Image (cartoon, helix red, strand yellow):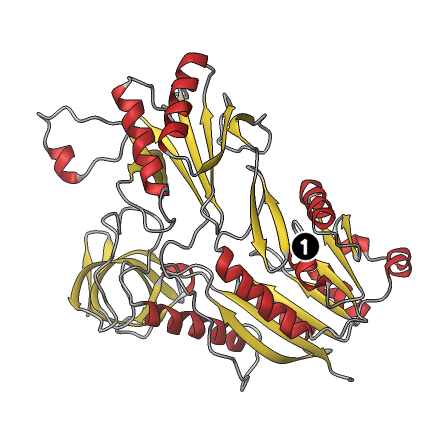
Amino acid sequence: MARKKGKNIFLENIEILRAGAKGISIGKSPDGKTVLVKDAIPGDVVNVNVYKKKSSYLEGNAVEILKKSPYRIDPKCIHFGTCGGCKWQNMSYETQLKFKQDEVENNLQRIGGFHDLEITPILGSSEDYYYRNKLEYSFSNARWLTLEEIRNTEENYNRNALGFHIPGQWSKVLDIKECHLQAEPSNAIRLEAKRFANENGYEFYDLQNQEGFLRTMMIRSNLKGEIMVLVQLFKEDKEKREAFLQNLQDKFPQIVSLLYAINPKGNDSIYDLDVQIFSGQDFIMEEMEDLHFKIGPKSFYQTNPAQAYELYKITRDFADLKGDEVVYDLYTGTGTIAQFVSKKAKKVVGVEAVQEAIDAANANAERNNITNCTFYCGDMKDIFDDNFIEQNGMPDVIITDPPRDGMHKNVVETILRINAKRVVYVSCNSATQARDLELMKHQYEIKKVRPVDMFPQTHHVENVVLLERIDL
């Protein structure tokens, strides 16, 4: 039933049928329109307040759950529903995997036009909590208040916070008491940083007026339990800085890299900052089989390292290298996949548009004594001219791992022109992947598909597809 409620449409008894993109669930209105619903999961029956009306769909919030889904569980985190992360914590992990598998299948069918594909069951993460190796927290003097706190006008609350930004309200920060994404001592470090700062009268950053002292804190870890902490300060105060950092060093011997940067800019990006060492070294090391990767404060590395190893093994398996192949690794980043497959290839050529990433790839290859990897910085839609291919050889296998937007159509055209025997397409967005695969279907046939869950408690899913040239 649908009825007006002020200017909005109010839908009653909407059954949520399936999970949609970006964590939004999908139901049907009484007149058959698609309804995109926030704050609900498949199997719920809800009342929906519609805030957007289009010709083909409606979008709204679930304002009342009339019947709970059998898939519902109690969220583990006390911040669930306010914090912007882990939006699927109210579903069992087995259910999350089911809907991620469904999303990959639906996108390949609906967008790519691929039917009757045999898709291998999704590979779940061995850890559905405490799997991240990096979290970034913000200091703020404008803590997000609960409704109870807002109504209690007589209480003078401490507004300092160290936590995550409220979705859609960047100037407000949710003070995090616990987070289940990164293993200890991550929580302990954050809580100790806040305690010391409050007890010693340190200024937490004012996001609106851009003033204060403590600004952000990044915690990185490796699988051995070593910790890197980087603190951004809005301004220099040597005495306060040293006292704050020394306290962290004294309390947490696991911190092998304690860094700081002065950041008076209008944003928190570290990439143009001069990062200084307070104690230890300016990196931590991560290992994968016999490879060692140096991770600095500005380095990109997969945030679920244990599952990244599984993803790379699937990629290497799909490539089916015998030892005499030339491999092109597109969107190579810091060259982790390229180096991971290199011992089974004659030669690997990595291409990436960011020079800093290429520098890191070369440094890692040198560290790992890999001599059959070559890395180039350039725009992939332009770089593969005749001279490049003559210099590096025609590839037998192409591995491509683009960002969420997928590949530029010119890159797709270049892959088709090169006409390698096999293409392994790794994607963090199966919708744009399906779009790209549809452009290649006249020349390549899908042979294998394997979804991989890199981010439990969220809607995100990776997918690996093996393509073989049709004329083989």
Q: In the displayed structure, would residue 427 be above or below residue 110?
A: above
- Left or right of residue 126: residue 418: right
Q: Residue 53, image x and y in percent?
A: 34, 59
Identify the residue under disc 1: 332
Quarter-of-image position of residue 342: bottom right
Where is 423 relative to 273, above or below?
Answer: below
* Residue drawn where x is 26% and y is 35% of the image: 144
Q: How many marks?
A: 1
Q: Is residue 205 above or below residue 314?
A: above
Residue 23 position in % (x across, y down): 37, 60
Q: Secondary structure at mark 1?
A: loop
- In the displayed structure, would residue 95 be above or below residue 368? below
Asked whether residue 429 is in view, the answer is yes
Name the residue: 58% across, 39% down: 296
Position of the C terminus, as image quadrant, is: bottom right
Of 291 and 240, nearer the camera is 291
Q: Seen from this angle, which residue lies furthest bottom?
A: 116
Position of residue 431 in the picture relative to residue 245 (left or right): right
